[in-house]
Image: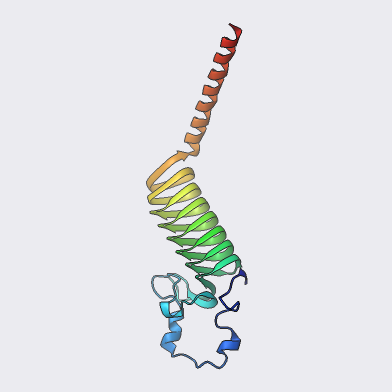
Amino acid sequence: MVWTGMIDDNGTIDGDASTTANAPMPPADERDETVAERSGTPAVTEPTRRKGIRDILYKLPGSREQVPATEASQTDLSQITATTVLLDRSGSEQITADRVSLDHSGARAIDAKSAQLDRSGVVALGSNHTVLLHSSAVQVVADEARLTDSSVVFLSSDNATLDNSRVIFFNGSTTGDVQTLITTRTAAILAGAIGIALMLVMLISRIGSRR
């Protein structure tokens, strides 16, 4: 697990052993609040969501299994590499992980097996499974993609499901409420039409120059 960037205002990891070694153990019910319990959403209750980066246990959606996760809250980072990355009101230049979840956050590039964005944005996203909820992206390349109330400039997916979402350039197959402006087929037709128009303009200009 690797991260670079700002940790907290003091330049240390929140919950470092030097500050917590003598702290009393909280009750079990409070400790349990550090693990997301509702509908698989990678969330931590507000009392524990302090600014900075910390290691938590994340409950996998539809499973009782808990896996180590790196969570960043209200933090700007240059790069994160981990198995599971959770961003809350944070930003990162590069994220590399098996699972990525962004909540009111942004990233320049994400490389993951599974990625979910909720009210977030990304420039370039590549993953096997992608879910965008009220989010936006410049480029998304995914085996499976589900978009709800979201916008993407370029989407390439073998199996895309769109719900009240807009895509400008699309490559692949899709179902649902599709609002695609240009597909690969229409782009090819448009390019052919532009080529023909240019040829006609050149031909007319040559005829005119001979007179």
Tell me the residue at 56%/20% (across/down). 199
Q: Residue 147: where, in percent of width, then height?
A: 42, 54
In terms of depth relative to the viewer, which is nearer, 166 or 120?
Answer: 120
Most extreme residue toward the front is 9
Tell me what residue is drawn at x 51 percent, y 62 percent.
Answer: 114
Does 29 appear above or below 88?
Answer: below
Quarter location, residue 36: bottom left
> In front: 181, or 49?
49
Snapshot quadrant of residue 95: bottom right
Looking at the rendered image, the quarter that the C terminus falls into is top right
What quarter of the picture does the N terminus occupy? bottom right
Q: Is residue 48 left or right of residue 7?
A: left
Task: Indicate whether 38 appears above or below 120.
Answer: below
Q: Please, which residue is most extreme toward the top here?
A: 211
Q: In the depicted view, which residue is nearer to us: 188 or 128?
A: 188
Vertical position of residue 124 compared to residue 23: above or below: above
Is the image coloured rainbow, by chain, by secondary structure, or in one colour? rainbow
Residue 56 location (% of width, % of height): 52, 78
Name the residue rendered at 47%, 67% in the picture: 89
> Does residue 156 sit above or below 3 in this rendering?
above
The spot of residue 103 in percent (x, y) is 45, 65
Image location (x, y in percent) of residue 175: 40, 48
In this rendering, the count of numbered labels is: 0
